[in-house]
Image: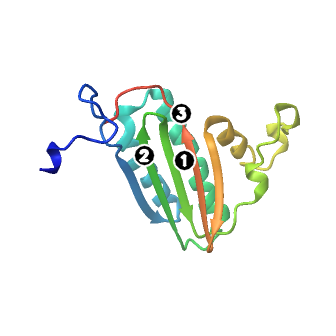
Amino acid sequence: MLADRPQPGRGPTETPRPEPKIFHHSFAADPLSVRFALRTALARFLRQLSQDEAGTLELVLAEVLNNIVEHGYGDTGHGTITLSLVRDHRGLSCSISDDGVELPRSCLDLGIDDSQRPAPDTLPEGGFGWFLIRDLVEELGYHRENGRNLLAFRLPLKPGSIS
């Protein structure tokens, strides 16, 4: 039987790791759907996160998803956002895709140090969000292909069980 065969890379004394579980959700690009997606994603990972980690995840996802609705689709309300999350030993890997307008490169400019940051009160409403996102996540990346945006990042988490 296949189950009786030795697993590649695993010795007889190694405990098999649980398979990472994926949260995958596509939803309409509107504020109410974003709220539902946030609640659903948080509920899926709540037992695996500390209170601070859950708050950080909610903050980052809310900022990104609301930016997509507001700036990626504007007033159209038409479009779809896809959110995927995977918890593994390195943290929580997140990818978000949409077919809204292209994300301005200035949002992801990682070369700005603290001395060059504008004061929060000089930014337009919501203008500090990308600074916050960049401070809270790791491995932030963006790619646009065939009219679709893909934003990916990893939220570092304390080591713990994966369920």
In the rendered image, the quadrant that contains the C terminus is top left
The reply to whether callout 1 and callout 3 are in contact (CB within 8 Å) is: no
Residue at 50% x, 28% y is 52
- SS at mark 3? loop
Would you place residue 93 above or below residue 24 in this image? above
Residue at 49% x, 56% y is 34
Q: Between residue 55 and residue 10, name the one nearer to us.
A: 10
- SS at mark 2? strand
Q: Between residue 6 and residue 140, name the one nearer to us.
A: 6
Residue at which label 1 appears = 61
Residue at which label 2 appears = 86
Check disc 1: other Cα within 10 Å, few if <14, some if 14-19, many if 20+. many
Q: Whole-Å distance between the Cαs marked 2 and 1?
A: 14 Å
Q: Between disc 2 and disc 3, whose residue precedes? A: 2
Would you place residue 18 above or below residue 24 in this image? above
Q: Amino acid at mark 3?
A: Pro
Location of residue 14 in the rendering, given as x and y in whole percent from the top left corner: 28, 28
Give the residue furthest to the left: 1
Q: Whole-Å distance between the Cαs marked 1 and 3?
A: 14 Å
Residue 72 image-quadrant placement: bottom right
Location of residue 42 in the rendering, given as x and y in whole percent from the top left corner: 41, 42
Q: Between residue 147 and residue 131, name the one nearer to us.
A: 147
> Which of the two discs, 2 and 1, sits closer to the camera?
2
Residue 50 image-quadrant placement: top left
Q: Whole-Å distance between the Cαs marked 2 and 3?
A: 12 Å
Whether residue 79 sits left or right of residue 126 in the image: it is: left
Total numbered labels placed on residues in the image: 3
Residue at which label 3 appears = 156
Q: Amino acid at mark 1?
A: Leu
Whether residue 1 sits left or right of residue 26 in the image: it is: left
> Which of the two discs, 1 and 3, sits closer to the camera?
3
